[in-house]
Amino acid sequence: VSVSDLVASVPPLAGLPLEFEQIAQVDSKDMSFVIWRDLALRVAHHLAREDVQGVVITHGTDTLEETAWFLQTVLQPCKPAVITCAMRPFTAMVPDGPQNLLDAVAVATTPGARGVVVVAAGAVHCAQRVQKVHPYRVDAFSSGDAGPLGWVEEGAVRLVKNWPSGQSKQALLAMKNIASCVQWPRVEVVLSYAGATGALVDSLVRDGVQGIVVAATGNGTIHRALEGALLRAQAAGVRVVRSTRCPEGQILPKPGDTFADSRGLSAVKARISLMLELLA
Ligand code: ASP
């Protein structure tokens, strides 16, 4: 379904001054760096236009949180860039996409709105916290114990937290780096679990990995066999970042921790941040 067909399926959008552009059309499990770069550049282009109040991005649900974090990190826009999605297909008896799209436009046209946010099932989530937490139900996204930024009710936004912060120097720099980048740094995610070994990490290091994010157990604990391999990797110059595989909360860092911690980012988002750091 093209973006113009999606917009046409929402009659209340008919009278609004909307422009649309198709950047890509992929199952979001296959999201690529090339699409991310093109998307970031086009969103930046449109948001810089005086006659544009905000941008809405339609996206598959599967990697939506990664795209949201990527865009928020490289753009930190002072206007809203609202990502929305659908859990049900366009052809479903009661599809959720049209309402999500209408709500996303409501957020994008809310005075004072800014940052990359996600709108789904009536909730507004920030890019930093949002995660897909359910493979099937319509209300599939959660911001964990942080909760959403607000809700969209009858076309009005009821905000309970602040919009994400605006543009920083790092964002401008990150944007420059991704525009000129040919080869993205290789960063992989590994998981700690009962009976984990270091074999995967050792082979990643042999294969030239530049960064590893470990999704650790609980408050950042790592199986000793895996930890040994990560220490060897770090000693060999590989950047290692520790996140938790717990879906809520964040690791409480202690002085003297051996690995950098993801400061509350999930493993997949910590991977994006580490890639952008390595790129810089
Ligand atoms: N396969 C879809 C995607 O692109 C799933 C969905 O949108 O719900 O993520």
Image (spheres, rainbow, N blue to C red):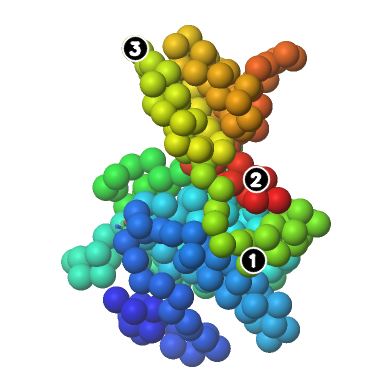
- Which percent across, then down, holds residue 233? 55, 24
- Which percent across, then down, holds residue 113? 67, 64
Q: Which residue is mark 3?
A: 195
Q: Are marks 3 and 2 in contact (CB under 8 Å)?
A: no
Q: Which residue is mark 1?
A: 180
Q: Amino acid at mark 1?
A: Ser
Q: What is the CA distance from the residue labelled 3 to the residue labelled 2?
A: 31 Å
- Which percent across, then down, holds residue 144? 51, 36
Q: Is residue 113 visible?
A: no
Q: Are marks 1 and 3 in contact (CB under 8 Å)?
A: no
* Horizontal side, residue 232 vs residue 199: left or right: right
Q: Secondary structure at mark 1?
A: helix
Q: Does residue 33 lie above or below 236 as drawn? A: below
Q: Earlier in the sequence, mark 1 or mark 3?
A: 1
* Image quadrant occupied by the N terminus: bottom left
Q: What is the CA distance from the residue labelled 1 to the residue labelled 2?
A: 14 Å
Residue shown at 56% from the left, 36% from the top: 211
Q: Is residue 197 visible?
A: yes
Q: Amino acid at mark 2?
A: Leu
- Front residue of 183/161: it is 183
Q: Secondary structure at mark 3?
A: loop
Q: Earlier in the sequence, mark 3 or mark 2?
A: 3
Q: Amino acid at mark 3?
A: Gly
Residue shown at 51% from the left, 44% from the top: 186
Q: Which residue is mark 2?
A: 278
